[in-house]
Image (cartoon, grey):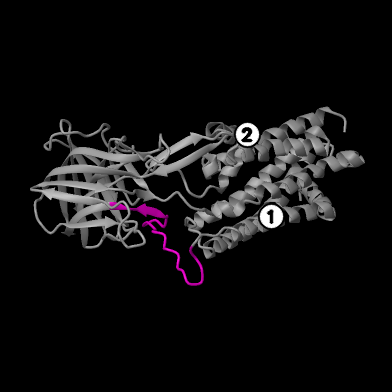
Amino acid sequence: MTDFARLVRAEWTKFRTVRGWVLGMLVAALVIVSLGLFSAAGSHTTCGGASEVCPAVPVGPDGEAVNDKFFFVHRPLQGDGSLTARVTSMTGQMRLPDAIPGVRNVASGVVPWAKAGLMIKDGTREGSAYAAVMVTGGHGVRMQHDFTHDVAGRPGGVSKDSPRWLRLTRAGDTITGFESADGRNWTRIGTAELAGLSATVRIGLFAASPGALTVTPADLGGSITAERFAEASATFDQVGPQGEGWTYDDVAATLNPDGTAHHPGSASRTAGTFTVTGTGDIGPRLDGPTIANTLTGVPAGLIALVVVSVSVITTEYRRGLIHTSLLASPRRGRLLAAKAIVAAAAAFASGLAAAGVVVPAGTRILRANGNVVLPVSWLTELRVVVGMAAFLAAAAVLALALGALFRRSAAAVSAAIALVILPHILATASVLPAGVGQWLLRLTPAAGFAIQQSIPEYAHVLGNYAPSAGFYPLPPWAGLAVLCGYAVLALAAAAFHLSRRDA
């Protein structure tokens, strides 16, 4: 065993023999679990009672929750084939905030991600595999498939004077989208592989529009988000190959209590010209609880963990034991590194146990209470559990380093809370404007909280991607890397000062 390994072992022996430190780590884990389960138990929806069945969440081919609502004019396609059409207009209407109370404010226009075009879909069941080529309200021509995939075509809108030709072809499981300005010279947009497509699929014309999203500043900071009704209408002609057997489907229409469709879509045909009107969206579902909702106790548990980690070094200064430790290990940087390893390992074990219990148990409670928890893969759930343990370990190292720098528990604990916990609270509790909150979660150690995000941001889906809505400005591992960077820098500064100052 090397000298450093013996030093780590000695620090571990010291840690586990101090009952307060061990108890503190247990308290941190228990706080995370108890608050997470309490929060989940208190979250109920109107469905889920003894005599009521919650509606199933549509799930896409990759297992993600999806929105799959649109109006579809389609016919069967057996085997290989294609469909071509010219889009000559795209119009719509949207509900805006009422300028006069009680008077509906409806304006003409389409939202940026309103869409209309051609689609091949493996039946009309919500969540079934599809590929589509489309014009959009503000993002040009796109090809999208299986809800999460999006490829850009040419920018620009569509009008009678500037129509867009679209074509979608099937060759086995391969779907290819094309666009043209004149119907003669074609440009390939993209290709999608839809494994396991049925021999007979549905091919046709569609239209959809997500709601008009407005985000307005609140009086006391933060923002107020509202999504209001919007619909899109598109006109198609030159549809080929020609044929009959068209079916009209308002896919996933929302029903009123009397069974009629709420804001129904529609379609009409005059000779060879189709007009299709639809509402809804086709893409990943972002609204609803996630597995991160079970981790509401992390900030409180982190306080207990910070107190323990700071005490690992400040207790020795307060009691004069630091002289004995330095005599046993004259190389002061090695002593601090050994303490950091022990604190990180204890915090990681505590966090792994807590997250490993509260994430699956809390998720089950949320679903039992009727909540539609957005599903994720087991790999994503594992990443959240292990990542949260790593987050707590990095925070423990940062707290230890601050303890070595300040040498006083109160100052070090206050600094750790101000650096890690306070920015997260300010950013996610709608206290600050969303832009300010995003910068806090980029530049401060609180960026590490991003490791708990399980639903990514999608560029082709309209949403309020703000910290208050559970979205972080950095990817999960990048956010954790920011926290780790702070921990390493603080530990290096503490080692430098320890080597330059008297114990």
> In the structure shown, which secondary structural element does the residue marked by tag 2 occupy?
loop
Question: Alpha-carbon neighbours of circle 2 within 10 Å: few (<14), some, or many (≥20)?
Answer: some
Q: Is residue 172 visible to the viewer in this orientation of the structure?
A: no
Quadrant the C terminus occupies? top right
Label 2 sits on residue = 444
Q: What kind of residue is marked 1?
A: Ala
Q: Secondary structure under badge 1?
A: helix
**For this rendering, which residue is in front, 154 or 260?**
260
Residue 370 in view: yes
The dominant secondary structure in magenta is loop
Q: Residue at x 27, y 59 (%)?
A: 124
Residue at the (15%, 30%) spot, across then down: 161
Amino acid tagged 2:
Thr
The magenta stretch is 47-70
Q: Position of residue 470 (x, y in %)?
A: 53, 45
Q: Which residue is mark 1?
A: 349
Determine the residue positioned at 51% across, 50% down. Answer: 454
Question: Residue 470: which disc?
Answer: none
